[in-house]
Image (cartoon, rainbow, N blue to C red):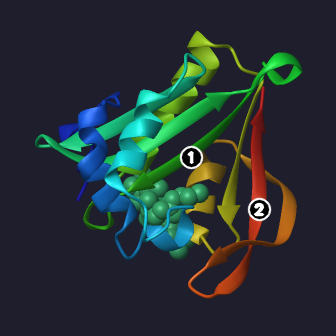
């Protein structure tokens, strides 16, 4: 069932940190993002406090509960026309269109408010759901990174994906 009509997308706040830490520790999330089981609440608070004017982070809320996070970081200097994104949704709220809503929010900022020419990301090669979501939003695979990231005791490949306009 679609949950998108009840979802609020808004800028992140440091008070969201406990909920975000809980989500990044969930089975079904931690394996395919770059979090660690030892990540501390203070680290998450500090990361949000240290976001700059080149960071554009949004949370998704359902009934007042934070259920996902997406972020865009704009490049510096001669990569000022490009941005790098990340995205995750709590296990219980996946496959209901919330990831799509968060991605739409990032791409609206990138396209219509910053007029970026290139948006890129990396995704675990096995993460078919995320890859399909990015492809539906115009991303294409540009590269295959071999043994580039550790998860659950093994080295995994990633794809570099980008959307150019
Ligand atoms: C990847 C992720 C962000 C997607 O968010 P989401 O809210 O589940 O995404 P949506 O519901 O908007 O879209 C998922 C779509 O993928 C489809 N899908 C599910 N499993 C799939 C699969 N194995 N292959 C292809 N498509 C799949 C769903 O049917 C859904 O399609 P629909 O929009 O047509 O219904 C979320 O699942 C997540 O946080 N996963 C764990 C962390 C992660 O992998 N983050 C991305 C790191 S790059």
Position of residue 68 in the picture relative to residue 119 (left or right): left
> Which quarter of the figure is the N terminus placed in?
bottom left
Considering only order in the chain, which callout, 2 or 1, is on the residue closer to the N terminus?
A: 1
- Name the foreground residue: 60 vs 111: 60
85 in relation to 67, above or below: above
111 in relation to 127, above or below: above
Q: Residue at x 27, y 43 (%)?
A: 4
Q: Is residue 8 visible?
A: no
Name the residue tied to disc 2. Answer: 159
101 in relation to 90, above or below: above
Q: Is residue 67 visible?
A: yes
Q: Secondary structure at mark 1?
A: strand
- Name the foreground residue: 68 vs 128: 68
The quarter of the displayed image where residue 158 is located: bottom right
Q: Are marks 1 and 2 in contact (CB under 8 Å)?
A: no
Query: How busy is the neighbourhood of tag 2: few (under 14 within 10 Å), some, or many (20 plus)?
Result: many
Name the residue tied to disc 1. Answer: 86
Position of residue 68 in the picture relative to residue 84 (left or right): left
Q: Residue at x 62, y 31 (%)?
A: 73
Position of residue 126 in the picture relative to residue 35 (left or right): right
Query: How busy is the neighbourhood of tag 1: few (under 14 within 10 Å), some, or many (20 plus)?
Result: some
The quarter of the displayed image where residue 128 is located: bottom right
Q: Is mark 1 within 8 Å of ligand 1?
A: yes
At which x and y percent is residue 39?
43, 61
At which x and y percent is residue 34?
57, 61
At which x and y percent is residue 24?
39, 61
7 in relation to 129, above or below: above
């Amino acid at each position: 069932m679609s949950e998108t009509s009840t979802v609020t997308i808004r800028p992140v706040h440091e008070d969201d940190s406990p909920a975000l830490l809980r989500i990044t520790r969930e089975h079904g999330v931690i394996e395919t993002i770059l979090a660690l089981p030892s990540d501390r609440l203070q680290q998450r608070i500090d990361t949000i406090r240290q976001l700059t004017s080149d960071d554009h982070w949004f949370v998704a809320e359902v009934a007042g509960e934070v259920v996902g996070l997406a972020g865009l970081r704009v490049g510096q200097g001669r990569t000022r026309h490009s941005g790098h994104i990340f995205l995750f949704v709590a296990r219980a709220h996946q496959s209901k269109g919330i990831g799509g809503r968060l991605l739409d929010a990032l791409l609206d900022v990138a396209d219509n408010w910053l007029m970026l020419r290139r948006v890129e990301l990396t995704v675990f090669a096995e993460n078919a759901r995320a890859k399909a979501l990015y492809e539906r939003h115009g991303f294409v695979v540009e590269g295959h990174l071999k043994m580039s990231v550790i998860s659950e005791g093994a080295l995994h490949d990633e794809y570099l994906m980008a959307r150019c306009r």
